Image (cartoon, helix red, strand yellow):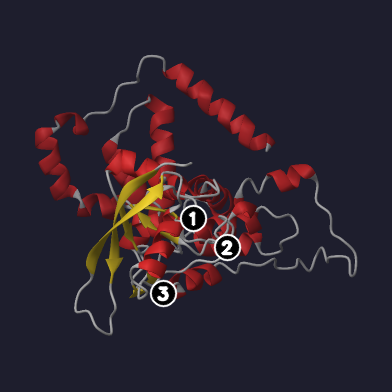
Amino acid sequence: MVESVAVPISVYRYDPARDATPRYVDYSLDLPRHTPVLTALLKIRSEIDSTLSLRYSCRSSICGSCAMLINSKSRLACQTQVGPELDLHGRVVVDPMRNQPVLRDLVVDQGPFWQDYERIVPHLVPDPAHPMPEGKPNPMTPEQVDRFYETPRCIACGACYSACPAKEADPTFPGPMALAKLYRFVVDPRDGARRERLLRIQPGGLWTCLRCHLCTSSCPKDVRPSERIRDLKELAIHEQGATEAGSRHAVGFKENLHDRGLLNEMRLVRQTDGVVGLLRQAPQGLRLARKKPELLKKPRRIEGQDQVQKLYELLEDEEGGA
Protein backbone atom coordinates (compact mmCIF):
# COMPACT_ATOMS: atom_id res chain seq x y z
CA MET A 1 0.00 0.00 0.00
CA VAL A 2 1.34 3.45 -0.98
CA GLU A 3 1.71 5.72 2.03
CA SER A 4 0.02 9.12 1.89
CA VAL A 5 1.36 12.38 3.32
CA ALA A 6 -0.37 15.62 4.30
CA VAL A 7 0.04 18.09 1.45
CA PRO A 8 -0.70 21.77 2.19
CA ILE A 9 -1.73 23.54 -1.03
CA SER A 10 -2.28 27.28 -1.49
CA VAL A 11 -4.21 28.11 -4.64
CA TYR A 12 -4.61 31.51 -6.28
CA ARG A 13 -8.29 32.39 -6.49
CA TYR A 14 -9.82 35.28 -8.40
CA ASP A 15 -13.28 35.67 -9.87
CA PRO A 16 -13.53 39.12 -11.50
CA ALA A 17 -17.32 38.96 -11.25
CA ARG A 18 -17.17 38.75 -7.44
CA ASP A 19 -13.66 39.57 -6.16
CA ALA A 20 -12.12 43.01 -5.85
CA THR A 21 -8.63 41.52 -5.53
CA PRO A 22 -7.04 38.07 -5.86
CA ARG A 23 -6.51 35.91 -2.79
CA TYR A 24 -5.04 32.55 -1.83
CA VAL A 25 -7.11 29.73 -0.40
CA ASP A 26 -5.38 27.03 1.65
CA TYR A 27 -6.28 23.36 1.34
CA SER A 28 -4.84 20.22 2.89
CA LEU A 29 -4.97 16.81 1.23
CA ASP A 30 -3.65 13.37 2.11
CA LEU A 31 -1.90 12.19 -1.05
CA PRO A 32 0.84 9.79 -2.15
CA ARG A 33 4.08 11.68 -2.81
CA HIS A 34 4.03 10.79 -6.51
CA THR A 35 0.62 12.48 -7.04
CA PRO A 36 0.71 15.11 -9.81
CA VAL A 37 -0.26 18.62 -8.79
CA LEU A 38 -3.01 18.49 -11.45
CA THR A 39 -4.55 15.46 -9.75
CA ALA A 40 -4.48 17.32 -6.43
CA LEU A 41 -6.24 20.32 -7.97
CA LEU A 42 -8.90 18.11 -9.53
CA LYS A 43 -9.42 16.43 -6.16
CA ILE A 44 -9.94 19.86 -4.58
CA ARG A 45 -12.48 20.71 -7.26
CA SER A 46 -14.39 17.45 -7.01
CA GLU A 47 -14.35 17.01 -3.23
CA ILE A 48 -13.87 20.42 -1.59
CA ASP A 49 -14.61 23.41 -3.85
CA SER A 50 -16.39 22.90 -7.16
CA THR A 51 -15.90 26.56 -8.12
CA LEU A 52 -12.14 26.18 -8.72
CA SER A 53 -11.33 26.96 -12.36
CA LEU A 54 -8.36 25.50 -14.21
CA ARG A 55 -7.46 24.38 -17.71
CA TYR A 56 -6.35 20.83 -18.51
CA SER A 57 -6.90 18.09 -21.07
CA CYS A 58 -4.66 15.08 -21.72
CA ARG A 59 -3.00 14.68 -18.28
CA SER A 60 -0.04 13.14 -20.15
CA SER A 61 2.33 16.09 -20.79
CA ILE A 62 1.25 16.23 -24.43
CA CYS A 63 -1.37 18.97 -24.83
CA GLY A 64 0.27 21.66 -22.66
CA SER A 65 -3.08 22.89 -21.33
CA CYS A 66 -2.22 22.64 -17.63
CA ALA A 67 0.76 25.01 -17.61
CA MET A 68 0.76 27.14 -14.46
CA LEU A 69 3.10 28.47 -11.79
CA ILE A 70 3.95 25.89 -9.14
CA ASN A 71 6.04 27.33 -6.34
CA SER A 72 6.88 30.30 -8.61
CA LYS A 73 8.13 28.19 -11.51
CA SER A 74 6.31 27.77 -14.83
CA ARG A 75 5.62 24.10 -15.51
CA LEU A 76 2.97 21.50 -16.34
CA ALA A 77 0.78 20.53 -13.39
CA CYS A 78 0.33 17.00 -14.75
CA GLN A 79 4.10 16.52 -14.83
CA THR A 80 4.93 17.96 -11.40
CA GLN A 81 4.63 15.67 -8.37
CA VAL A 82 3.75 16.96 -4.92
CA GLY A 83 6.51 15.05 -3.09
CA PRO A 84 9.54 16.93 -4.48
CA GLU A 85 7.71 20.24 -4.00
CA LEU A 86 7.15 19.44 -0.32
CA ASP A 87 10.83 18.54 0.07
CA LEU A 88 11.97 21.83 -1.48
CA HIS A 89 9.33 24.27 -0.27
CA GLY A 90 7.31 22.61 2.49
CA ARG A 91 4.05 23.28 0.63
CA VAL A 92 2.62 23.63 -2.88
CA VAL A 93 1.67 27.13 -4.02
CA VAL A 94 -0.19 27.33 -7.33
CA ASP A 95 -0.62 30.51 -9.41
CA PRO A 96 -1.81 31.28 -12.94
CA MET A 97 0.80 31.84 -15.62
CA ARG A 98 2.46 35.24 -15.91
CA ASN A 99 2.38 37.64 -18.86
CA GLN A 100 -1.24 36.76 -19.68
CA PRO A 101 -4.39 38.30 -18.16
CA VAL A 102 -6.17 36.16 -15.58
CA LEU A 103 -9.72 35.25 -16.56
CA ARG A 104 -10.56 33.31 -13.42
CA ASP A 105 -8.48 31.47 -10.83
CA LEU A 106 -5.82 29.50 -12.75
CA VAL A 107 -7.25 30.17 -16.21
CA VAL A 108 -5.50 32.87 -18.23
CA ASP A 109 -6.37 34.60 -21.50
CA GLN A 110 -3.94 33.08 -24.01
CA GLY A 111 -4.93 35.55 -26.72
CA PRO A 112 -1.66 37.58 -26.44
CA PHE A 113 0.38 34.36 -26.57
CA TRP A 114 -1.24 33.20 -29.81
CA GLN A 115 -1.17 36.68 -31.33
CA ASP A 116 2.60 36.80 -30.81
CA TYR A 117 2.84 33.36 -32.39
CA GLU A 118 0.86 34.46 -35.45
CA ARG A 119 3.16 37.47 -35.89
CA ILE A 120 6.07 35.25 -36.93
CA VAL A 121 4.04 33.64 -39.79
CA PRO A 122 4.19 30.10 -38.33
CA HIS A 123 3.86 28.13 -41.51
CA LEU A 124 5.97 27.21 -44.49
CA VAL A 125 6.08 29.88 -47.21
CA PRO A 126 6.61 28.19 -50.60
CA ASP A 127 9.67 29.31 -52.55
CA PRO A 128 8.60 30.27 -56.11
CA ALA A 129 12.10 29.54 -57.37
CA HIS A 130 11.90 25.98 -56.01
CA PRO A 131 8.25 24.88 -56.19
CA MET A 132 7.26 21.80 -54.27
CA PRO A 133 6.42 18.78 -56.39
CA GLU A 134 2.65 18.61 -56.67
CA GLY A 135 1.19 15.44 -55.20
CA LYS A 136 4.62 14.13 -54.23
CA PRO A 137 6.69 14.26 -51.04
CA ASN A 138 9.42 16.87 -50.72
CA PRO A 139 12.05 14.97 -48.75
CA MET A 140 14.80 16.47 -46.62
CA THR A 141 18.14 14.96 -45.70
CA PRO A 142 18.80 13.87 -42.10
CA GLU A 143 21.37 16.67 -41.84
CA GLN A 144 18.73 19.25 -42.80
CA VAL A 145 16.27 17.87 -40.28
CA ASP A 146 18.96 17.89 -37.58
CA ARG A 147 19.18 21.67 -37.93
CA PHE A 148 15.71 21.95 -36.38
CA TYR A 149 17.24 20.73 -33.11
CA GLU A 150 14.48 20.27 -30.50
CA THR A 151 11.95 22.78 -31.92
CA PRO A 152 9.48 20.16 -33.26
CA ARG A 153 8.97 18.94 -29.67
CA CYS A 154 7.25 22.18 -28.65
CA ILE A 155 3.67 21.66 -27.42
CA ALA A 156 2.89 25.41 -27.17
CA CYS A 157 2.14 25.16 -23.45
CA GLY A 158 3.28 28.75 -22.81
CA ALA A 159 5.53 27.89 -19.85
CA CYS A 160 8.46 29.70 -21.47
CA TYR A 161 6.24 32.69 -22.26
CA SER A 162 5.16 32.87 -18.64
CA ALA A 163 8.75 32.63 -17.35
CA CYS A 164 10.15 35.30 -19.70
CA PRO A 165 11.19 38.59 -18.01
CA ALA A 166 11.77 40.20 -21.41
CA LYS A 167 8.09 39.67 -22.23
CA GLU A 168 7.15 41.15 -18.87
CA ALA A 169 9.34 44.20 -19.49
CA ASP A 170 8.39 44.72 -23.14
CA PRO A 171 4.91 43.61 -24.31
CA THR A 172 6.07 43.88 -27.96
CA PHE A 173 8.63 41.09 -27.47
CA PRO A 174 7.24 38.02 -29.30
CA GLY A 175 8.33 35.57 -26.61
CA PRO A 176 10.54 32.46 -26.58
CA MET A 177 8.10 30.02 -28.13
CA ALA A 178 7.42 32.22 -31.16
CA LEU A 179 11.13 32.82 -31.73
CA ALA A 180 11.96 29.11 -31.43
CA LYS A 181 9.25 28.39 -34.01
CA LEU A 182 10.62 31.17 -36.21
CA TYR A 183 14.06 29.55 -36.10
CA ARG A 184 12.49 26.26 -37.22
CA PHE A 185 11.23 27.91 -40.43
CA VAL A 186 14.37 30.00 -41.01
CA VAL A 187 16.51 26.84 -41.25
CA ASP A 188 13.96 24.87 -43.28
CA PRO A 189 15.44 24.60 -46.80
CA ARG A 190 11.93 24.41 -48.31
CA ASP A 191 10.90 27.82 -46.93
CA GLY A 192 11.03 30.77 -49.30
CA ALA A 193 10.81 33.56 -46.72
CA ARG A 194 14.10 33.04 -44.86
CA ARG A 195 15.60 36.44 -45.63
CA GLU A 196 12.33 38.28 -45.04
CA ARG A 197 11.90 36.56 -41.66
CA LEU A 198 15.40 37.52 -40.52
CA LEU A 199 15.11 41.11 -41.75
CA ARG A 200 11.77 41.54 -39.98
CA ILE A 201 12.72 40.03 -36.63
CA GLN A 202 16.02 41.83 -36.03
CA PRO A 203 14.31 45.18 -35.28
CA GLY A 204 11.12 43.34 -34.26
CA GLY A 205 12.12 42.19 -30.79
CA LEU A 206 14.91 39.67 -31.35
CA TRP A 207 17.48 41.58 -29.30
CA THR A 208 15.13 42.19 -26.38
CA CYS A 209 16.00 38.71 -25.08
CA LEU A 210 17.92 39.00 -21.79
CA ARG A 211 19.64 35.61 -22.16
CA CYS A 212 18.48 34.57 -18.69
CA HIS A 213 17.64 31.04 -19.96
CA LEU A 214 14.52 30.86 -17.77
CA CYS A 215 12.56 29.79 -20.83
CA THR A 216 14.83 26.80 -21.31
CA SER A 217 14.80 25.79 -17.64
CA SER A 218 10.98 25.93 -17.54
CA CYS A 219 10.35 24.01 -20.78
CA PRO A 220 8.77 20.59 -20.11
CA LYS A 221 9.96 19.23 -23.47
CA ASP A 222 13.58 20.43 -23.44
CA VAL A 223 13.07 22.60 -26.52
CA ARG A 224 15.84 25.02 -25.41
CA PRO A 225 14.31 28.20 -26.86
CA SER A 226 17.11 30.41 -25.47
CA GLU A 227 19.63 28.51 -27.59
CA ARG A 228 17.53 28.91 -30.72
CA ILE A 229 17.17 32.66 -30.02
CA ARG A 230 20.97 32.82 -29.83
CA ASP A 231 21.17 31.05 -33.21
CA LEU A 232 18.62 33.46 -34.68
CA LYS A 233 20.78 36.40 -33.59
CA GLU A 234 23.79 34.94 -35.36
CA LEU A 235 21.77 34.21 -38.50
CA ALA A 236 20.27 37.72 -38.50
CA ILE A 237 23.69 39.40 -38.22
CA HIS A 238 25.07 37.17 -40.98
CA GLU A 239 22.12 38.03 -43.23
CA GLN A 240 21.81 41.73 -42.54
CA GLY A 241 24.79 42.87 -40.50
CA ALA A 242 24.66 44.68 -37.17
CA THR A 243 21.86 47.11 -37.92
CA GLU A 244 20.53 48.12 -34.49
CA ALA A 245 21.71 48.57 -30.92
CA GLY A 246 21.41 44.96 -29.76
CA SER A 247 23.32 43.46 -32.66
CA ARG A 248 25.93 46.24 -32.64
CA HIS A 249 26.47 45.61 -28.92
CA ALA A 250 26.98 41.89 -29.55
CA VAL A 251 29.45 42.48 -32.38
CA GLY A 252 31.29 45.13 -30.37
CA PHE A 253 31.55 42.82 -27.37
CA LYS A 254 32.99 40.09 -29.58
CA GLU A 255 35.54 42.41 -31.18
CA ASN A 256 36.65 43.79 -27.81
CA LEU A 257 37.42 40.35 -26.42
CA HIS A 258 39.09 39.25 -29.65
CA ASP A 259 41.45 42.21 -29.66
CA ARG A 260 42.57 42.33 -26.03
CA GLY A 261 40.60 39.83 -23.97
CA LEU A 262 39.07 42.67 -21.93
CA LEU A 263 36.25 45.10 -22.56
CA ASN A 264 37.04 48.66 -23.57
CA GLU A 265 33.80 50.01 -22.17
CA MET A 266 33.97 53.42 -23.83
CA ARG A 267 34.63 51.77 -27.17
CA LEU A 268 31.73 49.38 -26.60
CA VAL A 269 29.32 52.25 -25.94
CA ARG A 270 30.50 53.96 -29.14
CA GLN A 271 30.13 50.74 -31.13
CA THR A 272 26.64 50.18 -29.75
CA ASP A 273 25.13 53.67 -29.85
CA GLY A 274 27.52 55.63 -32.09
CA VAL A 275 29.17 58.94 -31.31
CA VAL A 276 25.83 60.59 -30.52
CA GLY A 277 25.03 57.87 -28.01
CA LEU A 278 28.49 58.21 -26.48
CA LEU A 279 27.99 61.94 -26.00
CA ARG A 280 24.52 61.37 -24.57
CA GLN A 281 25.96 59.04 -21.95
CA ALA A 282 28.98 61.27 -21.22
CA PRO A 283 27.64 62.61 -17.87
CA GLN A 284 27.05 59.10 -16.57
CA GLY A 285 30.42 58.03 -17.96
CA LEU A 286 32.22 60.82 -16.11
CA ARG A 287 30.55 59.83 -12.85
CA LEU A 288 31.64 56.25 -13.37
CA ALA A 289 35.17 57.32 -14.31
CA ARG A 290 35.62 59.02 -10.96
CA LYS A 291 35.03 55.71 -9.21
CA LYS A 292 36.58 53.57 -11.93
CA PRO A 293 39.38 55.59 -13.58
CA GLU A 294 40.57 52.60 -15.61
CA LEU A 295 37.58 53.25 -17.89
CA LEU A 296 39.57 56.09 -19.48
CA LYS A 297 42.56 53.88 -20.18
CA LYS A 298 43.04 51.56 -23.11
CA PRO A 299 42.80 48.00 -21.74
CA ARG A 300 45.98 45.99 -21.71
CA ARG A 301 46.13 42.73 -23.61
CA ILE A 302 45.54 39.85 -21.23
CA GLU A 303 48.07 37.09 -20.76
CA GLY A 304 47.33 34.25 -23.15
CA GLN A 305 45.44 36.47 -25.59
CA ASP A 306 46.79 34.38 -28.46
CA GLN A 307 44.82 31.42 -27.06
CA VAL A 308 41.64 33.51 -27.06
CA GLN A 309 42.22 34.40 -30.71
CA LYS A 310 42.77 30.74 -31.59
CA LEU A 311 39.38 29.95 -30.02
CA TYR A 312 37.81 32.63 -32.20
CA GLU A 313 39.46 31.14 -35.28
CA LEU A 314 38.16 27.67 -34.42
CA LEU A 315 34.63 29.01 -33.96
CA GLU A 316 34.79 30.95 -37.24
CA ASP A 317 36.01 27.84 -39.09
CA GLU A 318 33.16 25.83 -37.58
CA GLU A 319 30.58 28.47 -38.60
CA GLY A 320 32.03 28.61 -42.10
CA GLY A 321 31.70 24.87 -42.50
CA ALA A 322 28.16 24.71 -41.13
Instruction: Work out whether 130 lies above or below 299.
Output: below
The type of residue carrying mark 1 is Cys
Q: Residues within 10 Å of mark 1 (few under 14, many from 20)?
A: many
Q: Residue placed farthest to the bottom in the image?
A: 17
Q: Are marks 2 and 3 in contact (CB under 8 Å)?
A: no
Q: Is residue 180 left or right of residue 299?
A: right
Q: Earlier in the sequence, mark 3 or mark 1?
A: 1
Frontmost residue, 1 versus 201: 1
Is residue 126 visible in the rendered image? The answer is yes
Percent x, y for residue 21? 20, 74
- Across and down, in percent, residue 252 comes to 40, 41
Residue that appears at 13% across and 42% down = 286
Q: Give the residue type that dot 2 points to.
A: Cys
Placement of 83 over or under 25, stated as above or below: above
Q: Which residue is mark 3?
A: 109
Q: Residue at x 83, y 66 (%)?
A: 131
| N-terminal-most mark, 2 or 3 | 2
Tag nearer the camera, 2 or 3: 2
Q: Are marks 1 and 2 in contact (CB under 8 Å)?
A: yes
Quarter of the figure with residue 29: bottom left
